[in-house]
Amino acid sequence: MAENKVKVLPLEPSDGGAAFSSAIFQINAEKGTRTFYVHRNILSQNSQPFKSIVDGNWEESVKREINLEEWDADTVSRMIEYLYTKDYTWQKNGKVKPVPVIVPEEPPTGEHSPDAVRPLTPISGLIEYRGKQRRLCQRNGQLGHADKEIFGKSSLVHTKVYALANYRAIEGLSELALDRLLHSLSVFQSTEFNPQQIGYIVELVSYAYENTCWRFGKPEPIRQAVTRFIALELTKLNSTGEISILMSTYEDFACDLFSDLTRRIKLAERGMRHKYLAGVEVHTGASQPVNCIQDSQWRSSNINFDTTAEPVCLVPYYTEDVDKACTSFKVIRPEEEGYDHRYKIPTNLASEDYPCLISICDRDIQNKVSHVQLARVDTDKELVDIKERFGAAGATRDILGHAHDSDYLFLMWK
């Protein structure tokens, strides 16, 4: 049994160890061929569906057994890793590495000594995700063939994790998996796709639409992400008709893709009528205009995303007069010279010391702004990478200030 020994996780539970001294539940995965063991309190603290099972009076509650047999073992293992560590591993030494699973010879019981408690799911020998949630930057802005293969495979890994987290209402895990998928797709974007990479994308779309469902009143985030990626890269991905086959197979995907393409056509038509970008207006309210400025990694265009503040987005407006064309933008704080309250952006600041966004039109500068995008980041390094991919000529200072705990938001232009 020496080879089956599990290392103790470097965790200090806030509940003084109560989570690790609670009863053990067995989780069956992959048609019952793989088995995991998880502490009862770990399950109940992270998921309402799991809490209903472990604290209820159901057959599963009595038997201390939960069936996730329709889910593959690697995805279930990543979910369990997140329940214990608030992270999950998907890459090691440049390759996607399945999480190993070892089943003990004898099923454990709930009566464990507090001095020996540890998760029975083996998750040792794994590296942690490098950096914060969304970070895995491409090297020097270039991706080799092997890198593209890794990002193709990892996109499906994150999609599977998202689907399981969404199914079991583990909100933090679904957000983490979605962020990692968005980053993988943004790095994968604007490349030439070989048949193997197109195969990854086809499998990704198929899995997303087979294992998630439409949400009443709002789009399903992961469906929206993959559809937007397909719309941006449609001509390259559909070179031999793979996307057409997907559209005939999944009616929801066809409708979502048609909707996204229609929006892009409208924006293109508007751009053809107006040659120059004249500035940016601030729009408040839940309904976002079709032409609001998008996030570079396809996250929400709402400035106040993930806060309780009123939704705010930025909307470009255009002109045919070159002398009125915009050349750059500037964020100004209330205490600084040039502040104009007419252009203030109501962020999530409790003090209401909102910044304003000024459009600068310099007739002496030949290069006029033609494209704008938002960049939501939490490190300077990531902003450099995003600006390079976008080909930005410039970017404002942080729009949010101290409105958000971790995010920084910039407006880029070229």
Image (cartoon, rainbow, N blue to C red):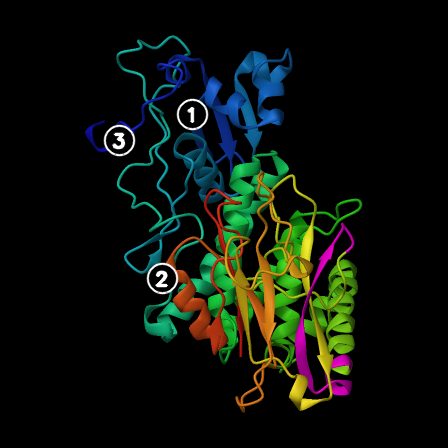
Is residue 156 depicted above or below 404 in this figure? below
Mark 1: which secondary structure?
strand
Q: Is residue 16 left or right of residue 290?
A: left
Q: Which of marks 2 and 1 is nearer the N terminus?
A: 1
Q: In this figure, which residue is indicated by the disc labeled 1?
A: 37
Residue at position x 63%, y 70% in the image: 230
- Residue 106 image position (x, y, % from top left): 36, 19
Q: In this view, does 285 lie to the left or right of 121?
A: right
Q: Give the range drawn in magenta.
A: 270-287
Q: Give the mark toward the camera: 3 or 2.
A: 2
Which picture quadrant has residue 363? bottom right
Q: Give the mark toward the camera: 3 or 1.
A: 1
Residue at position x 58%, y 60% in the image: 339
Circle 1 packing at 10 Å, graded few (<14), some (14-19), many (20+), is: many
Q: Earlier in the sequence, mark 3 or mark 1?
A: 3
Is residue 409 depicted above or below 115 in this figure? below
Kind of residue sitting beneath label 3: Asn
- Residue 394 image position (x, y, % from top left): 47, 74
Residue at position x 25%, y 30% in the image: 7
Q: In this figure, which residue is indicated by the disc labeled 2?
A: 381
Q: Distance between the residues labelled 3 and 1?
A: 14 Å
Kind of residue sitting beneath label 1: Tyr
